[in-house]
Image (cartoon, rainbow, N blue to C red):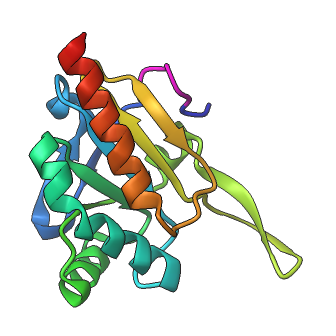
Amino acid sequence: MSAAEGQPAPALDLPTDGGGRVSLAALKGKPAVVYFYPKDDTTGCTREAQDFTAVAPDFAALGVPVIGVSRDTVKKHDKFKAKYDLAVVLASDEDGAACEAWGVWVQKKLYGREYMGIERATFLIDAQGRIARAWRSVKVADHASAVLAAARDLERGAQSG
């Protein structure tokens, strides 16, 4: 299965940094951003988390939580968040069930070697729990601002609808 635009968002209920828990069911009725990334404290993933942190106040003003998901442990998330002073929720999908459900656990290739890993992907969920926008195989540069623009468009649509 793969999460696609217009479809209901797959379930998400995971432990987070700081000993918390996040679930889309608990967020129903408001939009959210869920982004999947390969690994804490690697160059691209750090940049992506920092970029989302830089625009976190803008997402907060829209009432849109930003949730980063990887298969790293909660303990590793805590260290990553503290090291870079990140302002996004980091959820731990250690067993990979969420990655499978969202269709981001994929075959990857690096230097001719094939392996399974997390595809960098972002999903904008609307207030009804449907995927309003999906970005697959994300390139980090300018991505957070593009997601913010889409969240603003979603908000405008909700106000005029």
Q: Measuring 25% from the left and 70% from the top, which residue is drawn there? A: 54
Q: Measuring 23% from the left and 56% from the top, which residue is drawn there? A: 15
Q: Measuring 28% from the left and 74% from the top, which residue is drawn there? A: 77
Q: Position of residue 2 (x, y in %)?
A: 60, 34
Asked if the magenta segment contains residue 6, the reply would be: yes
Residue that lies at the very extreme toward the right in this rendered image: 112
The N terminus sits in image quarter: top right
Number of numbered markers:
0
Q: Is residue 55 left or right of residue 105?
A: left
**Range covered by the magenta-colored residues:** 4-8
Q: Is residue 83 left or right of residue 96?
A: left
Please tell me whether residue 93 is drawn above or below residue 160 in the rendered image.
below
Q: Position of residue 16 (x, y in %)?
A: 21, 60
Residue that lies at the very extreme toward the bottom in this rendered image: 83
Q: Position of residue 22 (x, y in %)?
A: 20, 47
Q: Nearer the viewer, residue 123 or 40?
A: 123
Using the rendered image of the protein, determine whether residue 94 is visible from the camera's viewpoint: no
Q: Main secondary structure of the magenta part?
A: loop
Please tell me whether residue 87 is drawn above or below residue 158 in the rendered image.
below
Asked if the magenta segment contains residue 83, the reply would be: no
Q: Nearer the viewer, residue 64 or 22?
A: 64
